[in-house]
Image (cartoon, rainbow, N blue to C red):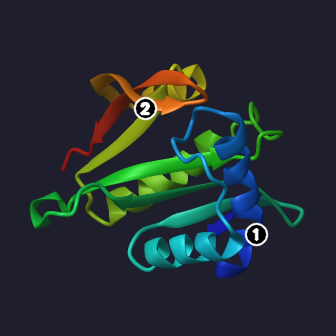
Amino acid sequence: MIRPVTIEDAEQLVSIYNHYVLNTIVTFDDVPFSVEAFKEKIDSIYKTFPFIVFEEEGKILGYAYANKWREKPAYKYSVESTVYLHHEAQGKQIGSKLYTDLLNQLKIQNYHVVVGGLTLPNDASVKLHEKFGFKQVAHFKEVGLKFDKWLDVGFWQLTFNK
């Protein structure tokens, strides 16, 4: 079931996210979040933007949200999207279900552009974004350093037609 996030979800969400922090290049965070810090993150996002979870039998298997793309007022119709899955829930189309719901909400709320920032290489995330019509618009070489390796970042963009 897909539903809106609640603060009570923070413990499960931080567990999902911290797996990526500690074990992958997917995020450039390198220090795990505390539950309290993640509660603050949830609180700062869900008041303004869609933030949803995929839950099955009381266990959260993934989450997705939109957030501010940039600070300046002219960017108010553009958002950045984020999706994370429990590492044991990959390959079950949960990311697609979350993205379908998130993008529908963003379209209804009259956002114009959705941007996805991806650490590269990341074939699964590239495929997910391109499945929904995102197009690669940028590729920055060696802009992040994690696990003693220089990493690239790509940006994919989806523009909603009015």
Residue 95 visible in image? yes
Helix, strand or loop at mark 2: strand
**x, y (%) of residue 20?**
67, 42
Name the residue: 21% across, 63% down: 71
Q: Would you say 130 lies left or right of 87 here?
A: left
**x, y (%) of residue 22?**
70, 42
**x, y (%) of residue 68?**
32, 61
**x, y (%) of residue 140?**
30, 24
Upstream in sequence: badge 2 or badge 1: 1
Residue 1 visible in image? no
Name the residue: 51% across, 41% down: 28
Against 93, residue 44 (above or below) is: below
**Dividing the picture into quarters, in which one does residue 105 lie?**
bottom left
**Crowdedness near tag 2: few (<14), some (14–19) or many (≥20) residues, C-alpha within 10 Å:** some
Q: Residue furthest right?
A: 57
**Crowdedness near tag 1: few (<14), some (14–19) or many (≥20) residues, C-alpha within 10 Å:** some
Residue type (three-letter) at the residue carrying disc 2: Gly
Quadrant (top left/top right/bottom left/bottom right) for the N terminus:
bottom right
* Separation of residues labelled 2 and 1 (CA atoms): 28 Å
Find residue 144 and name its label: 2
Q: Would you say 138 lies left or right of 119 here?
A: left
Tags 2 and 1 touching, CB below 8 Å: no
Residue type (three-letter) at the residue carrying disc 1: Glu
**Dividing the picture into quarters, in which one does residue 137 lie?**
top left
Q: Badge 1 is on which residue? A: 11
- Between 147 and 152, the one lying in front of the other is 147
Against 155, residue 79 (above or below) is: below
Helix, strand or loop at mark 1: helix
Name the residue: 34% across, 32% down: 156
Q: Residue furthest front?
A: 148
